[in-house]
Amino acid sequence: MTHWIPIALLSTAISFFATRLVMIQLGKHLLDTPNNRSSHSQPTPRGGGLGILISCILTYICVWVLIPDQAPDFFLVAIPVTMGILGLLDDFFNLGIRSRLFIQFALALAGTYYCITATNWSPIHLILISGLLVPLLIWSTNLYNFMDGINGIAALQAISTCTAMSGILIIQGVNAEEITLLVIIGFAGAGFLYWNFPNAKIFMGDTGSLFLGCAFGLLAVKTSIQNPELATAWLIIMAFFISDATYTLCVRLFSGQKFYLPHRSHSYQKLALRFGSHSKTSLLVFAINMLWLFPLALLSTSSHMHPILALALAYCPPIIMSIKLKAGKTIN
């Protein structure tokens, strides 16, 4: 466990300086100009998630070289990193939705194969479960992208998710390699957060959000196959992001809106407008994650609360909030 401290420090430091380097070298080329669908008012560089990506790659290499028995599986890192590279290309070139979804499908398929290849399930079970996991991994990747719309929210979500799930995995006695990856990702998010919160000097962009969404989805699938109780924990910890993104998408789809276009009708974006502050909204989400969802996840995995009750308590409040705030409906 002591090796996680230097890993955390290294990941934070690399992310901090790499993000600063991205700001200096790429800031003028990746400038996000505000419009009527933006939640920000000043032109701000995007693509800061490249700092997170660089940190995770370099820290993983250091772990693999120095303490290989603690290093995460190569594919557990490589698939999300490839998804992050897709995000980087999108940040630069604004790829079409079909191209993005095709590559995401291929990576989700590869991730599913990686997770289930060691199981002894029957062929029919493999087909059925793959048919469920592939779209779930694609949705996990994209919902994180949808929820990265105000200062700090995506990085704070990464920090809270990694903190909570690391604690739960330690209690459950899951393989240390998954915990090591959570430590790397969480502290890379912390290094980036300095430049993104409370006042954003750079945005995460698709590079960071696609990487994080894919990484958490893949980790959730892999650890849940090892221990099915952990599926509930992952769903609870991500409840705010999942409920807001899913509810908003459904409203936009059923109302005939183009779901893939930028907008500011998520409940967290409407909260930021009500509060007049990105910081208050992001900190509120962080507090919900750590003070409400994390305890629920702990109770459900320790058999002190029925998983269905824990899920209901996790999802009802954010769904009700989305309904009250009329998430998915355009702000005039």
Image (tube, rainbow, N blue to C red):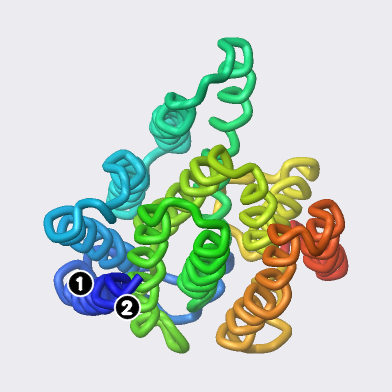
Amino acid type of the residue tagged 2 in the rendering: Gly
Q: Is residue 176 visible?
A: yes
Query: Helix, strand, or loop for circle 2?
Result: helix
Q: Residue 135 vs residue 8: left or right?
A: right
Q: Residue 312 vs residue 296: left or right?
A: right
Q: Residue at x 69, y 58 (%)?
A: 301
Q: Residue 119 vs residue 271: left or right?
A: left
Question: Compared with residue 225, is residue 39 higher up or lower down, i.e. above or below?
Answer: below
Of marks 1 and 2, which one's residue comes earlier in the chain? 1
Question: Compared with residue 53, is residue 1 higher up or lower down, i.e. above or below?
Answer: below
Q: Residue at x 70, y 50 (%)?
A: 246
Mark number for residue 191?
2
Q: Residue at x 73, y 84 (%)?
A: 274
Q: Position of residue 239 (x, y in %)?
A: 69, 60
Q: Residue 314 vs residue 80: left or right?
A: right
Q: Which residue is label 1 attached to?
A: 18
Splitting the image into 4 quarters, where does residue 262 fall? bottom right
> Which quarter shows the C terminus?
bottom right
Question: Compared with residue 257, is residue 151 higher up or lower down, i.e. above or below?
Answer: below
> Which quarter shows the N terminus?
bottom left
Mark number for residue 105?
none
Amino acid type of the residue tagged 1 in the rendering: Ala
Q: Position of residue 269 (x, y in %)?
A: 65, 72
Query: Helix, strand, or loop for circle 1?
Result: helix
Q: Residue at x 39, y 33 (%)?
A: 107
Could you tell me if the residues under marks 1 and 2 are in contact, i.e. CB atoms within 8 Å?
A: yes
Splitting the image into 4 quarters, where does residue 317 fall? bottom right
Q: Position of residue 137 (x, y in %)?
A: 53, 39
